[in-house]
Image (cartoon, grey):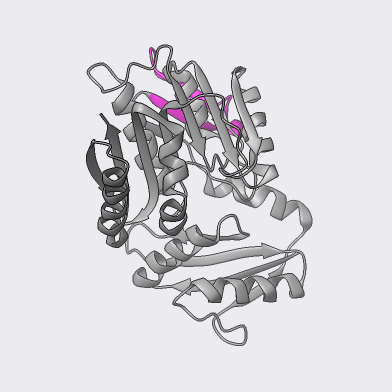
């Protein structure tokens, strides 16, 4: 096994995080120093050839050039080190009264009384919930379903498009949604999502490995969550709206702040063509945005 790493300044950290989001899932990850904003890009690979291919792939979406002969350092790792390495970058986090806890901290993490915890093993290449785009989705979902929110989850339905490790779908089920589905193009994502639901003894979530165009819906959903990326959200905008019921809620994330106005305009134009009315809300977290569309 080979580990590759290079230093990043604060501007490069932001640019690289955006590039990796477009590339996900991948073997690369960014470690940021929260004190000064600088950090490291790291990745682990089976061999030199796999690493070189990964570098070329990353260069195709990144504004930062990775020079194997200069900026990128490599070292050999034992296989067992790589299999455990991702665990060091996943720490427990909280949104509202929900605590997402890595499964290896199950015995040591104390969940406050009257609050809810669920356990997760995201695997080496899927979401831990730490990314701003996932946090925006979860915060919006919790706010939406809380007392005084726009959706009472009791008896309601939700679909998670691009389910990753199943965090959003699992949270929805814990909030009280009745019918919850999740789909992802990657079969490993659907498998890991199902395993994470089983870790928490949660039944009734159906994960499928398919794209939105292959998904055979039986009914529309009260809430549609799509945490993907801007160009995909735009390309699939008609299919996304078709999944929502007439007074449903659509939550879109994976959007860079600089792209959200254009995406909002695109969806408003599409809604106008369909003669549909909606209330639109934008939420921001660092350089990322969420677009909420309440149909009415």
Q: Nearer the viewer, residue 275 or 41?
A: 275
Q: Please state if 239 lies on the left or on the right of 125 as rendered.
A: left
Residue drawn where x is 67% and y is 30% of the image: 195
The location of residue 263, given as percent across then percent down, is: 32, 55
Q: Eyeballing the image, is 149 above or below 233?
A: above
Question: Split into 4 quadrants, where in the image is the N terminus?
Answer: bottom right
Q: How many marks?
A: 0
Report which quarter residue 43 is drawn in. bottom right
Q: Eyeballing the image, is 161 above or below 201?
A: below
The location of residue 269, given as percent across then percent down, is: 27, 51
Report which quarter residue 184 is drawn in. top right
Residue drawn where x is 49% and y is 15% of the image: 178
Residue drawn where x is 44% and y is 41% of the image: 240
Residue drawn where x is 45% and y is 55% of the image: 235
Q: Let me know if residue 241 appears in the view.
A: yes
Q: Nearer the viewer, residue 48 or 293?
A: 293
């Amino acid at each position: 096994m080979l580990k590759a790493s290079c230093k990043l300044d604060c501007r490069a950290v932001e640019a690289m995080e955006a590039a990796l989001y477009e590339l996900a899932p991948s073997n690369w990850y960014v470690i940021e120093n929260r004190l000064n904003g600088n950090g490291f890009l790291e990745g682990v690979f089976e061999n030199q050839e796999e690493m070189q291919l990964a570098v070329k792939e990353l260069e195709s979406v990144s504004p930062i050039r990775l020079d194997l002969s200069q900026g990128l350092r490599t070292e050999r790792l034992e296989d067992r080190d790589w299999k455990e390495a991702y665990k060091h970058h996943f720490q427990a986090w909280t949104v509202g009264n929900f605590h997402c806890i890595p499964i290896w901290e199950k015995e040591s993490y104390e969940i406050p009384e009257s609050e809810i915890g669920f356990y997760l093993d995201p695997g080496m290449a899927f979401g831990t919930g730490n990314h701003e785009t996932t946090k925006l989705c979860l915060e919006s979902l919790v706010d939406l379903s809380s007392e005084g929110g726009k959706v009472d989850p009791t008896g309601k339905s939700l679909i998670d498009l691009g389910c990753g490790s199943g965090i959003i779908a699992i949270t929805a089920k814990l909030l009280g949604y009745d019918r919850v589905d999740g789909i992802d193009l990657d079969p490993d994502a659907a498998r890991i999502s199902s395993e994470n639901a089983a870790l928490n003894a949660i039944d009734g979530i159906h994960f499928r490995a398919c794209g939105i165009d292959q998904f055979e819906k039986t009914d529309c959903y009260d809430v549609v969550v799509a945490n993907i990326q801007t160009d995909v959200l735009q390309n699939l905008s008609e299919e996304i709206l078709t999944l929502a019921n007439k007074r449903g809620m659509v939550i879109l994330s994976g959007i860079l702040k600089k792209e959200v106005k254009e995406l909002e305009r695109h969806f408003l134009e599409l809604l106008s063509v369909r003669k549909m009315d909606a209330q639109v809300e934008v939420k921001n977290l660092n350089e990322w945005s969420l677009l909420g569309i309440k149909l009415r």
